[in-house]
Image: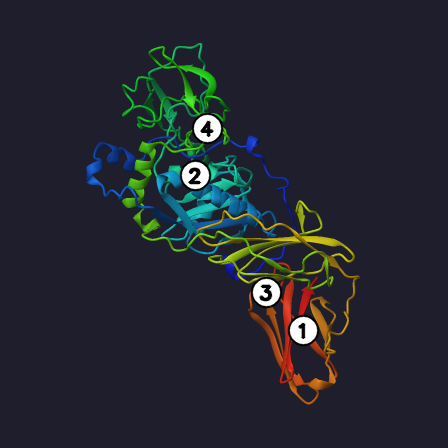
Amino acid sequence: MRSSLFTVLFCTISFAGICQEPAKEELYPCGAPAGVSDFMEKYQKNPWLYAQPESGDTLWVAVQVHLLAKDSGAGRIPWDRLLAAFCRLNQDFAESRIQFYMKEPWNLLNNTGWHTHSTIPQGIDMMMTNNAEGALNAYFVSDPAGNCGYNLPYGGVAVAHGCAGPDDHTWAHEIGHALNLPHPFIGWEGKTYNYNNPTPQVLAYDYTYFHDTLDTQVPAPLDTALVEFVSGANCTVAADRICDTKPDYLSYRWNCNPATQMSSVKQKDPSDVDFYSDGTLFMSYADDACQNRFSAEQISVMRATLANEKADWVTPVMLQQPVTALPAQVEPVMGQSQPVTGARLIWKSVPNATHYVVQASRIPSFGYKELDIVTADTFAVCGSLTANKTYYWRVKPFNYRHACQPFTAAETFFTNPSSRTGEPDADGWRCFPSVISDESVITLETPPSWAGNGIRICVFDMAGKPLFSGETDCREKMQIEISGLPAWPGGTYQLIAVSESGVKRQTLVKQ
């Protein structure tokens, strides 16, 4: 079942780090199969037969994002980290005049076997079960079969949490594959280059890469690749067959020389000419700190792919304007006091922002968050906090297309001493307890001004969905049984009492 983040508000307790997940250094850079796609081979031979987008036009590409968690719902990539990765993706593709937008709300999936899958068939099952039509499908998982990421040409791309962030280019690399770009080192996959040995002119490689995970009884099929010369004499038929990506024989993660942005490993082509690999290319295996571009010919291939093979991913116009401002935090600010349960955070809307990430923490660095939500509103209600503590809170605005605005500076508030019943408000109205269990009796105390009026009681989840509704005569003190509230993430609800005398609200937290 698909759960939409943008229609459900999640209150979560989370850590800034991702615990017990493989680090980038523990994962192979990319699990995409080697070789040149049929489309690219045909396009390069006869480019005039294919539609060509106008050179100055920006191609807006729909992406369906799928966020995996364990069966329990734990282990999902943090919202702010995903948005930082999305911002980086569009920055990486800016020069190509290809930009991405989220076609539908994030798809939240709880499946331990997909969240950490050790084989590609598990990833195939994940994609074939959940793919959305008319979009590039991107899955964020803890471990995509031991890789930082991979692309299935008929499925989508998978990206590891540990390889997604503001300074990572794995998402761009895998989308490059989805748009028919190969690695520049075709033929060298799984091989370690040795400068002291003569460089061959032809290499054999397993063009399925995942073959042994699908059928271990049949030998892996092999293909051959010509080894590219520095002179470019065979660049149209060797390796990636793209002439403005120079020879590269390094099929492992490597660091570049900061001064030259080239590899520190010297290589030698089949004619004994020395060279170093280009570390700036997103499609290489250079470290993320080295990478910063697609080549002009690579860009042509990707744009041709979108104009022809993947035209259903593209929309002709930008759907949303940029988010260029930060919201003003209204309250609480400067250490104002708030109740332990139901602290309300309020900010002003920002032009073009459709959603906000809101976080609250007792730690100024937000390394541990007691509130971490996405909402379309301009307020958020905290659950149960710790009494007599200073809290920090901040807000980040975004929309389906623009996610590069930072968080606001942190504001502070201070929690009052804990009280399960709370003090009556200025009108004399009170609702308790605010912390409830599976079957609870809620007591309402109403002021004399409400006497004689009927009262309607409703309970809503934080997305505004009604869960309980009933009517009763208004008395100074009454009890209402509330049971069967779903085990909704975060367990936070709004009770609303309506009478001719007014409207009152109370936050309920289910433990």
Q: Quadrant of residue 337?
A: bottom right
For this rendering, which residue is in front, 240 or 151? 240
**Disc 2/disc 3 C-alpha distance (Å):** 36 Å
Circle 1 SS class: strand
**Disc 4/disc 3 C-alpha distance (Å):** 44 Å
**Number of residues whose C-alpha sits closer than 10 Å to that of mark 1, classed few (under 14), some (14–19) or many (20 or more):** some
**Disc 4/disc 2 C-alpha distance (Å):** 16 Å
Q: Does residue 373 show up? A: yes
**Number of residues whose C-alpha sits closer than 10 Å to that of mark 3, classed few (under 14), some (14–19) or many (20 or more):** many
In the drawing, does residue 246 fall left or right of residue 486? left
Residue 289, position in %: x, y?
A: 51, 30
Check disc 2 and report the residue beneath it: 92
Q: Does the residue at mark 1 contact the one at mark 4 (Cβ under 8 Å)?
A: no
Residue 334, position in %: x, y?
A: 70, 56
Q: Quadrant of residue 455?
A: bottom right
Measuring 58% from the left and 35% from the top, which residue is drawn there? 23
In the drawing, does residue 93 fall left or right of residue 447? left
Q: Is residue 121 above or below residue 421?
A: above
Check disc 4 and report the residue beneath it: 285
- Dot 4 or dot 3: first in sequence order is 4
**Number of residues whose C-alpha sits closer than 10 Å to that of mark 4, classed few (under 14), some (14–19) or many (20 or more):** many
Say the numbered circle drawn on residue 482.
Answer: 1
Circle 2 SS class: helix
Q: Does the residue at mark 2 contact the one at mark 1 (Cβ under 8 Å)?
A: no
